Amino acid sequence: MLFRRLRSALLDRRGNVAVVVALSLAPLSLAALGALDIARATAAKLELQDALDAAALATAKSTVSDSTVLQQTGDRIFRQNLALDSDVTLSSDTFTFGTGNVVVATASAAVRPLILGSITGGPIVVGAHAQVTRAGNQLEIALVLDNTGSMAGTKLSNLQTAANNFIDSMSQAATQSGDPNAIKISLVPFSNTVRIGSTFRNAAWIDQSGTSPINNQIFADSTGAPIWANRFTLLTQMGVTWAGCVESRQAPYDIQDTAPSSATPATLFTPYFAPDEPDRGGTYFNNYLPDGQPRGTSWQVRQGGAAKYSGQPDLTSGMGPNWGCTLQPMQRLTTNFSALKTAVNAMTANGDTNIPMGMMWGWHTLSPNAPLADGVAYLTAKHKKIVILMTDGQNQMTDSGNSDQSFYSGAGYAWQGRVLQASGTPISGSNTQTERSAALDDRLSKICTAMKAADKDIEIYTMRVEVVGGTSTVLQDCASGADHYFDVTNSAQLDAVFQQIAGSIAALHLSK
């Protein structure tokens, strides 16, 4: 009986559909769960990519220039934008600087599978990648640094450390951009003159033939009347090489970046030439030739007689026509940051303070106009020109206590009247030190105003270091804003100040 029932059940085909369906459900279920895993992984990848894109874009738009800070910033923004399911785990995220001013971001996550793990042997790994080019500014920066006698010692060494570290910071910012011309820097050490360097001896913009009106002020005939003389000719006659210093141009060109032209001799740059001062009649400091004039002759004739400049000069103790020209030469705009640091380390301290001359040559290094014409055109898109002026003193034209009424400088002697007062009246030997300083301050103020004008748009930072007494108004007004002026009471703080400025400039470089 039992056997017959069993046999009947096995032969009965009415339940075949149910059996087949039951047997087919297993692979169908596996396929459905696998598809669900794939959909979950795809959703996780999309979420990962969206959050990474937002973080990469925000980080690229930031002013971050340090690799560690870039990672920290990118990671923070990425996680703020990320919203993963509970069964998805973030594995890693990286934010790095790529070639060509690019921020590169990557991320990966692990998705816990419902079924595919039994096949793959682990979680499903998904990844994302993003790359954003930073639209940064190219920068031209002029370091205009006080190298006057009062900087000697600790102040100069602190300045050298600060300037070198600043150059390193700018070098790092430039490297991250991938653009070889992203940041260029010039160096202009100044005191009572500026030494542009003897390599410009034959430049067309140097007064080669003595036609500039400045030349007939310090040379005289036997009656004391002014005469023209070619300074290079006189140097050759004495067997002396021009050391490379220049003098300020005749007003108003002393405060303009007007291109020099032989058609307008006053626009040419006159080679520095400190006259041989008289043998007698007072205490003089740069007496390197016999006057060759009889007693009773005026000091102007004894000092200015051009005929004497054919003798053999006494160059001991630094005397001679290059007296006061011991500065480190100016460095033009360059991306050779190593050479810049070498020049900074070679800076020496000597002489009075003529800030307008230093500032003017800082401007010349950035200008698209001759004499150097190294800068891009003013207001070029995505380019910025910046000057950093550092000084430890007030403008001076010190009274020498003799007939010249001052020491010779890039602005000549006080009696020449080459520096104009605010009223437009030239200073003279009778002006007090306060009046002379005020006149130089006014020239500096006019230079700064011209540089910051809308058609130039040069950004200016100023620093006053360990100045006791006096006023900082001229430097405060020269700066592009209150946050661009620094009154440094101790030169040991210079490095921190330069780094603060470096951070601001790096931010400008990386901003759109």
Image (spheres, rainbow, N blue to C red):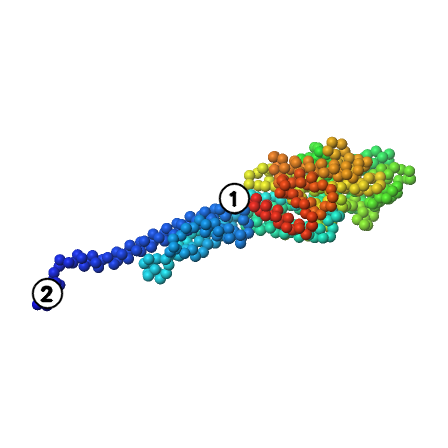
Q: Quadrant of residue 284?
A: top right
- Residue 359: horizontal and vertical position, in percent? 68, 41
- Residue 377: horizontal and vertical position, in percent? 60, 38
Answer left or right for 85 relative to 262: left
56 or 277: nearer the viewer: 56
Query: Element at badge 1?
Result: loop
- Residue 369: horizontal and vertical position, in percent? 64, 37
Answer left or right for 253 relative to 5: right
504 or 447: nearer the viewer: 504
331 or 92: nearer the viewer: 92
Residue at the image position 65 percent from the left and 35 percent from the top: 450
For mark 2, does the 10 Å Cα neighbourhood hold few (<14), some (14 to 19), or many (20 or more) residues?
Answer: few
Ranked by sequence position, the earlier of labels 1 and 2 is 2
- How far separated are the C-alphas under marks 1 and 2? 87 Å
Is the N terminus in the top left, top right, bottom left or bottom right quadrant? bottom left
The answer to whether the residue labelled 1 contacts the one labelled 2, judged by CB atoms less than 8 Å apart, is no
The residue where tag 2 is placed is 5
- Residue 347: horizontal and vertical position, in percent? 71, 50
Please, is residue 75 above or below residue 405 in the view? below
Residue type, label 1? Ala
* Front: mark 1 or 2: 2
The residue where tag 1 is placed is 135
Residue at the image position 58 percent from the left and 47 percent from the top: 506
Instruction: Inspect this view and state whether residue 406 appears.
Output: yes
